[in-house]
Image (tube, rainbow, N blue to C red):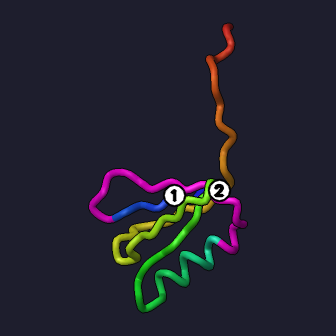
Amino acid sequence: MEVKIGLIDSPRELVIVTDRDRDEVEKVISDGLASGDGVVSLEDEKGRKYLVQAAKIAYAEIGAADARKVGFAPLT
């Protein structure tokens, strides 16, 4: 699952690829936004942990991870 988090006052977004399913990721983000400490914690498929201050989150997009394409376009 690919998670894109847009941050307030930042032109870039944080992209995390995780092996969790959509409902689990949505629950983690929702719980983090609603909790008193205001931190969203996500772990990627390589075991790296990301902590994001909930007050700085502008949006979160949860979708299937795209297969990475490598190489050149076919000749026509």
Residue at mark 2: 45
Given residues 63 and 25, the one toward you in this image is 25
Q: Decide: marks 2, 1 in contact (CB < 8 A)? A: no
Q: Position of residue 46 (x, y in %)?
A: 62, 54
SS for callout 1: strand
How far separated are the C-alphas under marks 2 and 1? 14 Å
Could you say which disc has been placed on residue 4 in the image? Answer: 1
SS for callout 2: loop
Residue at 63 percent of width and 71 percent of height: 25
Q: Position of residue 43 (x, y in %)?
A: 58, 65
Magenta includes 70? no
Which quadrant is the N terminus positioned in? Answer: bottom right
Q: Which residues are magenta?
A: 8-24
Kind of residue indicated by mark 1: Lys
Residue at 45 percent of width and 56 percent of height: 14
Residue at the outermost front position: 47
Residue 67 figure quarter: top right
Classify 10 Å Cα crowding around label 1: few (below 14), some (14-19), many (20 and above): some
Kind of residue indicated by mark 2: Glu
Could you say which disc has been placed on residue 53 in the image? Answer: none
In this picture, residue 57 sits left or right of residue 44: left
The answer to whether residue 52 is above or below residue 67 is: below
Given residues 40 and 69, the one toward you in this image is 40
Give the mark nearest the N terminus, 2 or 1: 1
Classify 10 Å Cα crowding around label 2: few (below 14), some (14-19), many (20 and above): few
Magenta includes 15? yes
Given residues 51 and 67, the one toward you in this image is 51
